[in-house]
Amino acid sequence: MIISIFTFLVGYFVVVFSQNLDSLPQQERDSLLILTAKNVVLKYGPGYYRDNKLPTIKRGQNPPKGMQNPTGKDANRGYYDVVFYYNTNKELLEYDYAYWVKIWSDTGKPSIVVFGNGMAKIIPEVDLRSSKTVNQVPYQQVDEWQRKHIKRSLKKENDREGAE
């Protein structure tokens, strides 16, 4: 009984992580993207996890082989960026997001996670399924002098947008 439940769960996750996300209805795709991104941040940088706002999800595509992509690695391959934001009144990071995760559209597998302090982790394909511990990115806000500079910059940007 326990073996059959385990087999079912393993099969479910293999299907979820190996399907073409572009072929799914938007609501189902977005739910899978958010769940995948959440699992990534909880494994690689749990201090950056935020559940207070819905993320922004954008589809992109790697450039073809050429000036921007000299090696041609993953040329024309589609991906989704799932970006989670934070409340700037409560904390301040180097960037305006807590973290973002790049997830391949053809497989549903995460490729990289970038944290709000500027650090990033490239995610090996096998890592998410592994129970092996990984080096996590520690949570880190910006220094006080940087905080004042960033707040001034954000205020100037908001003032400009309000004037337009």
Image (tube, rainbow, N blue to C red):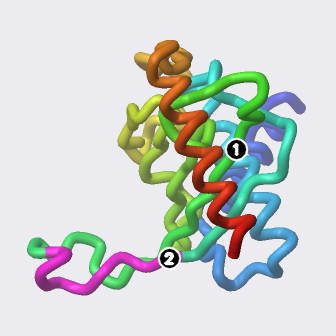
Residue 109 visible to an observer of this rendering: yes
Q: Quadrant of the N terminus?
A: top right
Q: Nearer the viewer, residue 57 or 104?
A: 57
Which residue in the structure is indicated by mark 2? 60
The amino acid type of the residue labelled 2 equals: Gly
Which residue in the structure is indicated by mark 1? 85
Q: Quadrant of residue 152?
A: top right
Mark 1 crowd level (few <14, some 14–19, many ≥20, 10 Å Cα): many
Q: Quadrant of residue 160?
A: bottom right
The amino acid type of the residue labelled 1 equals: Tyr
Query: Where in the figure is residue 84, as x and y percent of width and height?
Result: 68, 46
- The span shown in magenta is 60-69
Look at the picture and state if 79 lies above or below 98.
Answer: below
Query: Where in the figure is residue 39, as x and y percent of width and height?
Result: 67, 37
156 drawn magenta: no
Query: In terms of secondary structure, where does tag 2 sit?
Result: strand
